[in-house]
Amino acid sequence: MIALATEVLVIGGGTTGAGVAWDAALRGFDVILVERGDLAEGTSGRFHGLLHSGGRYVVKDPRAARECIAENRLLRRVAADCIEDCGGLFVTTPWDDPAYAEQFLAGCAAAGVDCDEIPVAQALREEPRLHPQISRAFRVPDAAIDVWKTVSALAEGARRSGARILTRHEVRALSGAGDTVTGALVHDLRRGEDVAIEARVTVNAAGAWAGQIAALAGIEGVHVRPGRGIMIAMNHRLVQQVVNRCQMPTDGDILVPIRTVSVIGTTDEHTENPDDHTVPPAEVDSMLDEGEKLVPGFRQARALRVWTGVRPLFQDGKVPALATRDLTRAHALLDHRQRDGVGGLITITGGKLTTFRLMAQQTVDLVCWMLSRMRPCATGSTPLPGSESGEHHRLGERLARKEATLRERQIVCECELVSRERLEAVLDETETTEIDDLRRRLRLGMGPCQGGFCSYRAAGIMHARGSLPVARADQALTDFLKERWKGIWPVLYGDQLRQMRFDEWVFHAVLDVEHLPADGGAS
């Protein structure tokens, strides 16, 4: 067994956990972050890509709205390279209550959300695919954020300040002395060995799984009610700005342009299991129908894939249970010494991806108090790695860079313009053996062909470098194809069905993937 010691142990490698690690490391604390999978593999990597202006919550959840707009403004500076400043619209469609628009305007004013009404004709000129019968349109500072780039930058920023980031490390138990948590026993899933980590403070940032982690310390009162929702990616940008329906939040009322696709979301159903990724066909049909209300002809557009995300919605066990749609999107910070008589443990859960930095700041403020070492937060003024210039991501900038070196640099993924050089650099950085990890870092396989061409190239490169024997490279390829298939089959119609039929010919008729050597075969 390996033994490690640190001041702050962070459990969870999503935006919240990575944000806590970054903040604590910047303040000079020794930090270890553990994550059972890859960074942003859970809830953070399963959302629609919206950097909230707060407009969505100004009527129903003003506290969340105020937090969102404040963090929106701040993240545009410190995480600029992760954000596309595309802007956003709230529009009143024929299916929306016209009276809500006045409530929306008043709510924006009260919450401090910048909001300007623009003529409908102007909105239709800017977004010609919008429903032609919208009656009002309001501009807000929504934006799109690349979550994988953000979490990778947070982790890199934490590493540069001395933090240790341990992915594929699953928490098996929390260690304790009396009524105090003193760290955790984790299992290294890659090497198959246990690691005992001693920590002065343990931060439970496991999101929808936070209740399970708290239960390891004998705390049963952390009620995180997972809210499962589906999202569908369309194969191109149907809109250039984030478009919301001007109504109380409901299913299928937002369309987000993220990179080269657009994503419609989202449903909201309670689930007991945070690992529940069920995609009910009825929800897919309902989402496509709702898309028609924003963009006529939505159903005729090509749907690339559907996926689920599980929101970590916290509810105090002392109040009656609410539907997940009615729970606040604001976060909860729990000091278990005061709340449950268990020292050395903090839980941070709930909230929005947009507010991760604020959540981290408040969490590390509490860590400082617990360690009697008050240090100022620096995340509000320190740019993340890659964002030092303050310039936002611009659609098309990758193409411009690649065109200048097309003859010198081999392209592995044409859809997302991933070069062999960049792929090999990530393999060196992460030592991963999973193509899905490359997808999160590079967007490999996320374009229209959904890995139809780049996945076997990536497997071949991983083997050619000597890091994987043939059988393991074959396994990496088939694992990736199975994972992609989960999100493709629910939207197999029209052009996407034709694409998948072509991919089937490639992988079965040409490569015969079903009969590749099994793991453990010859190299």
Image: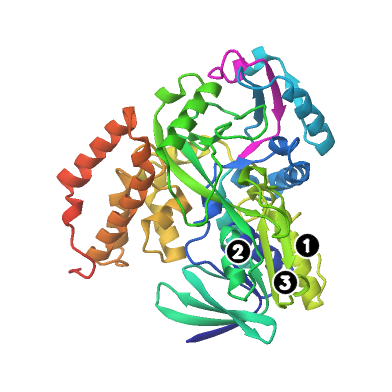
Q: SS at mark 1?
A: loop
Residue 318 lies, in percent from the top left, at: 73, 59
Residue kind at label 1, given as amino acid type: Cys
Q: SS at mark 2?
A: helix
Q: Which residues are magenta?
A: 124-144
Nearest to the observer: residue 195 or residue 105: 105
Residue shown at the point (77%, 68%) measured from the top left:
366
First reached walking from the N terminus: tag 1 or tag 2:
2
- Above or below: residue 235 compared with residue 40: above
Residue kind at label 3, given as amino acid type: His
Mark 1 surroundings within 10 Å by alpha-carbon count, few (fewer than 14), some (14 through 19), many (20 or more): some
Residue shown at the point (45%, 47%) measured from the top left:
443
Residue kind at label 2, given as amino acid type: Ala
Q: Which mark is residue 434?
A: none
Q: Which mark is residue 336?
A: 3
Q: SS at mark 3?
A: helix
Residue position marked by numbered label 2 in the rendering: 210
Q: Is residue 11 magenta?
A: no
Residue shown at the point (77%, 77%) measured from the top left:
371
- Above or below: residue 183 compared with residue 392: below
First reached walking from the N terminus: tag 2 or tag 3:
2
| Among the 4 quarters of the image, the one containing residue 323 | top right
The answer to whether residue 411 shows anywhere in this view is: no
First reached walking from the N terminus: tag 3 or tag 1:
3
Residue position marked by numbered label 1 in the rendering: 377
**How far apart, in angstroms, are the residues tagged by discs 2 and 3?**
13 Å
